[in-house]
Image (cartoon, grey):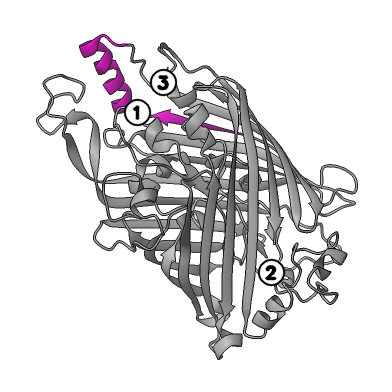
Amino acid sequence: MCDFRPRRRPKAQARRTRILVTCLGLTGLSLPLSARAVPPPVNLGNAAGASDDDSSGVFGFLSNWRRSSNLLGNMWGLRPELGKYGAVLAIQETSEVFGNPTGGSHRGAGYNGLTVAVLQVDTQRAVGLYGGTFNVSMEQIHGRNFSADNLMALQTVSGIEADRSTRLWELWYDQKFLDQQKLDIKIGQQSLDQEYMVSSNALVFANTMFGWPMVPSADMPGGGPAYPLSALGVRGKYWLATPLYLLGGVYSGSPTRDRDGDPQITNPSGTSFPLNRGVLAIAELQYVYPALGAMVSPDEVQPLSHVYRVGGWYDSEPFADQFWDNTGVSLASPDSNGTARTHRGAFSFYAVMDQMIWRSHTDANRTISIFGRAMGTPQSDRVPIDFSLNFGLTFNDPLPYRTDDVFGIGMGYTHVSGALANYDRAVRRYSGAYSPAQGGETYVELTYQYQFTGWMQWQPDFQYIFNPGGGIPNPSHPDRRLRDELVFGFRTNIAL
């Protein structure tokens, strides 16, 4: 199964005084064709076109449009032909409209969209090499960045917002080794939001922070290797014991060669492949229950599944101090030379929980699950965000005869680092200008994913953001903070 899920990517920081400039960005998409969540699940078997009938000419796919899992069916025979060589092609279009009737820098609505194409090749069928998978994916980003234009929030409302572009996303080869494929090695251009820090239940939501979290989005150079960017690296996954897996990798310290500017602009095609930067190392321990291959006897109750993850990352890149310059003077002072003190490296730790808490006795697909994710760093002197938190609940099959629908309610919180808040206070002290100290930002989201056909999902969405930007001034009224923001949205996911 191939599921696409947006996640988050920040823009570059034009002014160090406001992290909102670095964090207005965007999020990513879940695209390993092997297994991922929302929006929407694209069945790889059907992506190969085996069950779709295109026999009645150019528009033959329309005769089966209600039942097909892909709008274009077998793409006039292309997908079955690719399948002969072990190749699977999946294409998805995500389109959405968001609007804010209250709050923000100004009111209005905006459209943005994302088209992703993924080609995966099973090397056993293609060339007789057992256990290998080759993957290449492209993305075409269109529309406008609604969160940046209207909201100025740290935790952006949509995971697909990004600079308009057509770019390479991922390009990697994965090979399995040892008995029962206990070891899995992946090498190439990778997007970390596809495997690390993931909460599978959270991926139904639209907000960026339910995908790639706020801490790496704001703190990692260029926002880290996550949608719409990626980085060269090597990843290993090892099956330690029946419920335990160890995931880890080493990657380029930044997804772009340049240290300044918007990383999506300095690497516009996704083909920069920087090797002149630092090193990003990340490791994650996973506890998965029921474990792979677990059996349940007919007289036993099916267990309530859960996945727990703990991990951490370290990036060896230089990080700029959020308060002091390199002579020991506050960056807010008129006597400062404007060059921030440099720190070597930064790190963070995180924990993720996905826990099913209820399953219907009459319908095994009807379940309620909760999720939570916390991430933080003690190095508040060198990063703009020092803590972020998400948690929520999802209800699968919430209404009778709606077996593929999902209802979700969740929230997120992020906290601006103490050093950056002190900088705001210093600006007020030295200049007398209105400069409130940034603090925390909280949002809540209510969403419903409606499976209209096998290839289309509709998703109305509601979000409310408290203290946008952590309490920054409103550019339209510099003497007051941004007001809380009410946001309505509607997303459509189409598997082509």
- Residue type beneath disc 2: Leu
Q: Amino acid at mark 1?
A: Arg
**Residue drawn where x is 62% and y is 56% of the image:** 4
Check disc 1: other Cα within 10 Å, few if <14, some if 14-19, many if 20+. Answer: some
Report the Cα–Cα distance between label 2 and label 1.
43 Å
CB atoms of marks 1 and 3 within 8 Å: yes
Residue 72, given in percent of the width and then of the height, sits at 74, 66
Q: Indicate yes or no whether the magenta region holds residue 419.
A: yes
Quadrant assignment for the N terminus: bottom right
Q: Give above or below for 267 relative to 218.
A: below
For this rendering, which residue is in front, 419 or 208?
208
Q: Which residue is mark 1?
A: 18
Residue 294: image location, x then y, percent:
69, 67
Q: Which residue is mark 3?
A: 472
Question: Regarding mark 2 in the picture, which secondary structure is present there?
Answer: helix
How far apart marks 1 and 3 lie (CA) works out to 8 Å
